Amino acid sequence: MGVNIGCYNVRRAVQIQALPQHVWHEFYDARRMSAWFSIGHNLELYEPGKDGRVELSVQMADGELHGFGGHIIAFDEAKELSFENNWFGQGAWPVPTIITIRLTSNYDGTMVELFHHGFERLGKSGADQLLSYESAWDTSHLAALKKIVEGP
């Protein structure tokens, strides 16, 4: 199923009481996606579909806005969105990491998993990058998605 998740991965998850097809409505367009995925960073561009793009920006400790993202490599309706993730410009990695969001039927709802993975592709620095991102990701995006889908 979908993109292979490597051994160096950050995983966050939430159970949502709705079918995967219903949860997937929040992946249809930039407005819907931004409502939950623009927490802690900004969704600047979202072109849903295979070969589309996801571009984001984040304000770093230095006060500068830094852009990142890349091409969508998997867009399997009600199952998976995966896109390349790399910094734009100076500071870009030699190869991108990957962000994958998977929806899986679970009990009477959907398990939504967010993976930031592919750090092993960065070679020796991959382990340090993984550790850095392990503490950076939280569940706020997934909690917002849950609230939107399930309601207040």
Image: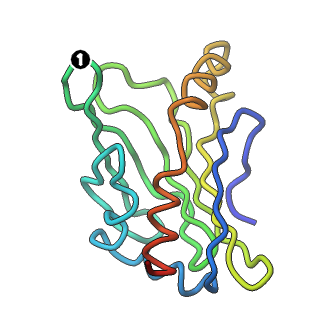
Q: Which of the 4 quarters of the picture holds residue 97? A: top right
Locate residue 128 relative to residue 88 in the image: left or right. Answer: right
In the image, residue 42 sits, relative to residue 106, either above or below, namely above
The residue closer to the viewer here, 89 or 136, is 136
Residue at point 53%, 79% (across, down): 23
- x 45%, y 81%: residue: 151
Q: Which of the two residues, 71 or 30, is positioned nearer the viewer here?
A: 30
Q: Is residue 65 above or below residue 79?
A: above
Residue 14 % position (x, y)? 64, 62
Q: Is residue 100 above or below residue 36?
A: above
Residue 88 position within the rendered picture, expressed as x and y whole percent measured from the top left: 31, 33
Residue type at mark 1 is Asp
Q: Tell me, what colour scheme is on the image?
A: rainbow
x 76%, y 66%: residue = 1
Q: Is residue 30 left or right of residue 133?
A: left
Q: Position of residue 127 (x, y in %)?
A: 67, 19
- Tag 1 residue: 62
Which residue is at 28% across, 49% downward? 42
Q: Is residue 145 above or below residue 131?
A: below
> Quick one: SS at disc 1?
loop
Farthest residue in the left direction?
A: 64
Tell how many labels.
1
